[in-house]
Amino acid sequence: MAFRKLSLTEPVLKALAHEGYSTPTPIQQQAIPLVLQGKDLLGCAQTGTGKTAAFAIPILELLQAQKPLKPGIKVLILTPTRELAIQIDESFAAYGRYAGIRHTVIFGGVSQHNQVNDLRRGTDVLIATPGRLLDLIGQGFIRLDQLQIFVLDEADRMLDMGFIHDVKKVIAKLPEKRQTLFFSATMPPEIQKLAAVLLKHPAKVEVTPPSSTVDKIEQRLCHVAKKEKPELLLHLLGNPEIRTTLVFTRTKHGADKVVKILQRNKVRAAAIHGNKSQNARQAALADFKNGTLRVLVATDIAARGIDIDELSHVINFDLPDVPETYVHRIGRTGRAGNAGIAISFASADEKEELRDIQKLIGKNIPVITDHPFTENAHVMAPPPGERTARPSSRQKQGDRPQNNNRGHNNRQPNRQQPVKKAHSPAQPKPAAHQHQSQPKSQQPQRLTLEQWEEEERW
Ligand code: AMP
């Protein structure tokens, strides 16, 4: 299907051609006609599916049809993070290149001066994060009485980030008569409740639920002791095929630590997370996009919505607590039809997270066995009842002798060596053979207290 079939006008078609888009993505195919008809929309879709264009394109069309436009903000797009807000604004700039629709973005963490100046010049579309929006409404710089369309983007993330009260305050300021577009990657009960408050007889569009959107991404798992994760990361980065990689850590502190280690080893890296200033985050993102940085280390909230075309790898340095987050993370790669590779590090204390992730995605992540750090990995036993479904875990459990002497001076990894199996699933050896070749007493079963403590130090 071509964009032309969606009855779009020439300025928008020309801009899409300029972007190199030839075919609408599934969410665009479904959502664009519904929004053009003026319907409320409940969209279950995550970033990476083309969701931004799915609302930006019909909004541009609806506004164009009203030309000459009356003054006032006609469209409000509320989004949880500054990065997302900027990206949505960039999308309006790109798809609206020939449309002559004014758009402005406002977000916190920077001076309001330029934003207020932009607002004074007048805007048709306002893209905002909740705090700054309420702030500027409070100061009298923003009025929403001319509003026609309200878009709530990433509603689940908005709630996760504790913006529910701000969102409610914004909703209270919207005109009753309006079109509302509501997007969320997941639809837990509290999101459904919020949707019920906001939407009137919505049309529902759902693209590939989170667990299946990742099918095109090659996923790999490395069992590794927690304290050896930095070395494993450095080892993987010895592979020049990893041109750019986004590395996810669970904590801000962890992100900073990883960056320090990488920089010490001459890897161009920076971190983005909530403790970094807006300018530092923007600079890191820009350097990563233009190739100055090879590695961007991020926490989940900071990375949400980061839109980097041609990101070749995502590395989960830590597994996320919430399994859906795994899907969001690895969805940063493999975008818009590009191939992507996601490598996850799993230490012994992350077995529950791993189990939940594999349950969500409905498969076991193929294990890379030929990295130098498997020895101390303390591979987890598969959950009861799933033994036959987890050949890789079982194979690994019998695969390595336990090394109680946790030093590894005798096996310095060669960082120049590419990781052989990073691009193809590790082939499990027959489990029977593994168990025969390994005396039972040497099979790692659980960590000793000392080992736990040692790992916790990381
Ligand atoms: P989003 O889900 O809005 O974050 O978009 C994900 C990525 O897909 C962005 O890099 C867009 O530029 C790109 N994209 C969106 N729509 C299309 C399309 N129809 N064809 C190709 N790429 C697209």
Image (tube, rainbow, N blue to C red):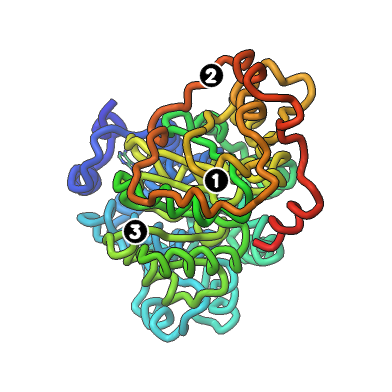
Q: What residue would you read off at disc 1?
A: 183
Element at label 1 = strand
Q: Which mark is residue 450?
A: none
Asked if the residue at tag 2 contacts the one at tag 3, i.e. Cβ–Cβ closer than 8 Å, the answer is: no
Horizontal and vertical percent position of residue 204:
56, 33
Side of 295 relative to 164 (left or right): left
Q: Label 3 vs label 2: CA separation? A: 34 Å
Residue 317 in view (yes/no): yes
Please name the amino acid that badge 3 sits on. Arg
Horizontal and vertical percent position of residue 23:
28, 32
Q: What residue lies at 33% left-to-right and 63% top-to-bottom?
A: 293
Q: What residue lies at 76% left-to-right and 30% top-to-bottom?
A: 441
In primary-sequence order, the first of circles 1 and 2 is 1
Question: Residue 333 or 306: which is nearer the viewer?
Answer: 333
Q: What residue would you read off at disc 2?
A: 429
Please name the amino acid that badge 1 sits on. Phe
Question: Residue 372 or 332: which is nearer the viewer?
Answer: 372
Side of 397 relative to 372 (left or right): right
